[in-house]
Structures are given as structure tokens and as C-alpha cells.
Amino acid sequence: MPSLKEDGKNFMAKKLFVKYILPTFVLSVVACGGLHFNQLAPEALDFHPQRIAIFPIDVWNNKESDSRAVVEQIVAGTLIEKRLFINVTDVEDLQKQLLANEELRKAKDEYLSKLRLLNFYDSDLSRKIGKKIQVDAFLVISVDEWKYFEQGDKKLAQVGLTMEMYDVLTGKLMWKASHTITRDYMLLKPGLPEIARDVAGKMAYYMPH
């Protein structure tokens, strides 16, 4: 028969498990339900942008109808709805500013060109753009998957996005993440925009703000 001392030890061990070990386990399980890819720059720990601009999606390599504008609107709407930033400059607003200002348009094209071709962060250009459109960060979006397909006897709908956030002051990449959601269906196709909203909503949770 266990002694009172042993009972006391067992009781304390259970208390410690509930207080420390169990929460750690729960946090680990929650973390496992995160994004497929999520990378934060070390400098991003102190990066809290208040105003953000969404850059237009450049390339569409998917077989389904070109829905770039739909994705851009979904991402902007998600950020506005979640109130992560004081101001969100969506693609439509940015395009108007680019059309009205040739110097701004050239700066934006040159900044993105150096970024893609040379992997070079031009801080002078990013600050110039940021000052003109009054933002602290740029968000660049890629559509990785936008399709309906079959796998064995399953019919599937899939949307995958990649997002990159750049600091205006340095021009550097602060955060990059990718996530894909795949849903199966039988007769009624789930709308790809609806899936995109879920993808964007989940990614926004991990976005620096």
C-alpha cells in the first residue's frame, strides 16, 4: 500500500504534468496544424508594418481560367477583414497610382526586376516606392495551384498560394509562406475562390503585423 509520502509525490507529479507537460503537448499539436511552409527573417521579430501594399500577380501558369484579379481581391479583403493593418492598398488602387505616376511605375518595375533576376534588395528603390504610396511593406503573391483534377477515383479541387512580405525601409524579405488546401467532392465542385479565402485566411494568421 503506497505511503502518504508516495501519494504526495504522485499528486505533485500529476500537478506538474497538467501545469507544464500537457500545455506543451497541446501547443505542439496546434503547431503541427500550421502552414506547409512558413519562414520568418530574424529581423522580422521587430517588424510590425501598419500599412501594406499588395503587388499585382505577374504570372499565371494554371490551366483553369485566369483568376488573378479574384485572388488579389480575396487577399486584400482578408487582410481588411482581419484588421491586421491600419491601411491596405489593394492592387486596383496601386495600379491607378502606377498609371498616374511614371516615375513610380519605373521604380516598381526596376525593384521587382532586381529582386527576381538578381535576388537583390534595392533599399533605395523600396523606400522611394514606399514613400510615394505611403506604406511600410509590400506583399507579393504567387498562385501555385488553382485547379480541379482527379486522383484515382477521387475528384479534387486545389488552391495553393505563396506570399512574400518585404520591408520598405530595407527592401528585404521579412516573411515567406506557402499553403495549399485540397478538397474532394462528388457532384458539386467547390468554388476555387472559396478555397482561396480559406488559404488566405490561414496564411494571414502567420503574417507579421
Image (tube, grey):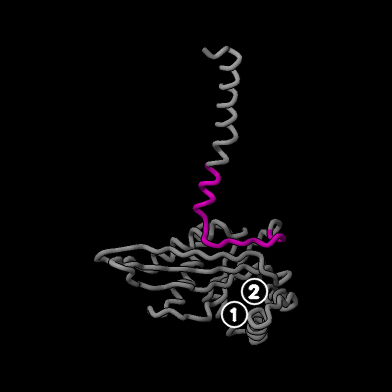
User: Which residue type does callout 1 highlight?
Assistant: Gln
Q: Are marks 1 and 2 in contact (CB under 8 Å)?
A: yes
Residue 11 included in the magenta stretch of the image: no
Q: Which residue is mark 1?
A: 97
Q: Secondary structure at mark 1?
A: helix
- The residue at 56%/17% (across/down) is 7
Residue 155 at x, y = what percent? 30, 67
Q: Secondary structure at mark 2?
A: helix
Q: Which residue is mark 2?
A: 133
Q: Nearer the viewer, residue 147 or 90?
A: 147
Q: Earlier in the sequence, mark 1 or mark 2?
A: 1
Q: Nearer the viewer, residue 178 or 67?
A: 178
For the C terminus, the image quarter is bottom right
Q: Is residue 127 left or right of residue 163?
A: right
Residue 22 at x, y = what percent? 54, 36
**In whole angstroms, how far apart are the C-alphas of marks 1 and 2?**
8 Å
Q: Which portion, as a residue range, is magenta?
A: 26-44
Classify 4 as above or below 154: above
